[in-house]
Amino acid sequence: MALLPSFERWGDLTGRRVLVRVDFNCPVSVVDGRTVVSDDFRIRSTLPLFTDLLDRGARVVACTHFGRPKGRVVAEYSVQPIRDRLNELIEGVELLENLRFNPGEESNDRAFGESLVAGFDYYINEAFSASHRAHASIMVPPSMVPSAAGPNLQREVATLQSLLDSPARPFVAIVGGAKVADKLGIVKVLADKADTVIVGGGMAYTFESTQGRTIGSSLFDARYVEECAKLLAAGNVLIPADSRGLGDGEPFGRGGGPDEPRYFGANIPDGCEGLDIGPEAVDAFVRAIANARTILWNGPVGVFEDPRFATGTEAVARAVAASDAVSVIGGGDSVAALQEFGLEDQVSFVSTGGGASLEFVELGDLPGLTALRESPFA
Ligand code: 3PG
Ligand code: MG
């Protein structure tokens, strides 16, 4: 695939105006009545690019979406708290107001995109995690001015690409999350590329249901039963052998009040819900991960936000962290899990893009990358 255009070749940028599309869609929280950025990872990760551009004399303006205000000005989604944090971290970078206040952003309106980039000499896309959205700020500027991929975007693409093209084997992928509808596509692609695909989380119960196992009132999507069965028949998709959850099953430990986690074995009785993988599944998953030389992890294997059902996800996170394999983590939830257990420094690469990294693995490209490659100035 053609390389993404890079901005190194632009040389001196004295007096040049550069528009940088970033993804500062950061979590915020209210402290003493003031909205503040609670995780500035996405802002900090752009600082090397901004510093480089400023050092080369450029005038730098950044733009981002924030939340989903749906084309209207909604005070709650003003970028002001993000701008405040950016200004604390670096001087001399302007941040435009939320792109999604204008309906033209999400509808990929040509006129809106043109107005955005009017007066700029260059455009850089440093928003890998938004590049699966064919929105105006991503798609239009590369057709208007010389454009390039930012360094973080390049690194994300190169990392995912090499993992798909030439993984050291065994290549073990772990796919979790609640909805089988969201993840079936990537399981299919990975079943072809990886040696083992571990499936956990709410999505696993639809797979389990195809094996003559009962799943009680666990998450289930009848539309995908046939495809799940087909994937299991291929032989390299590993699903949980047992689970834990809530309901009237045999008590997992002592006690056994209604809020106590229960152990269900392979079959979940009526009126019970699986919420985490069981100990046999933990063993099998950890063994497969320990054997891997390449790991891709996207999505938790249980409802880990609830400490009662964090056991499986914690075991997976620890196994991934302990491994010497090349390990790539994508998706906000798996990253949050790593952070929760203090393990984010013990993996090879943490992708900033949840949806974007999934879509890149599934489809092999993203609209925002195509736009850069097809730029007439590239
Ligand atoms: C994200 O945070 O997942 C990205 O910024 C994309 O946001 P979106 O899902 O609202 O397009
Ligand atoms: Mg998202």
Image: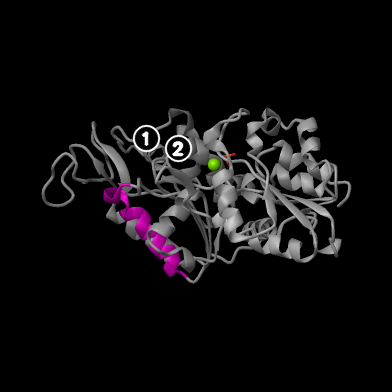
Which amino acid lies under the numbered mark 1 shown in the image of this protein? Leu
User: Is residue 336 inside the magenta stretch?
Assistant: no
Q: Residues within 10 Å of mark 2 (few under 14, many from 20)?
A: some
Residue 219 disc label: 1
Asked if the residue at tag 2 contacts the one at tag 1, i.e. Cβ–Cβ closer than 8 Å, the answer is yes
Determine which residue is flagged by label 2.
179
Magenta stretch: dominant secondary structure: helix
The residue nearer to you, when weighing 306 against 21, is 21
Disc 2 on helix, strand or loop? loop
Which amino acid lies under the numbered mark 2 shown in the image of this protein? Lys
Question: On the picture, is 104 further left or further right than 322?
Answer: right
Q: CA distance from mark 1 to mark 2?
A: 8 Å
Point out residue 303 in the picture as x, y percentages from the top left corner.
35, 45
Point out residue 317 in the picture as x, y percentages from the top left corner.
41, 60
At 78% from the left edge and 55% from the top edge, which residue is drawn? Answer: 59
At 26% from the left edge and 39% from the top edge, which residue is drawn? Answer: 268
Which range is magenta?
A: 306-323
- Tell me the quarter of the image containing the N terminus: bottom right
Question: On the picture, is 300 further left or further right than 93?
Answer: left
User: Is residue 317 inside the magenta stretch?
Assistant: yes
Residue 92 disc label: none
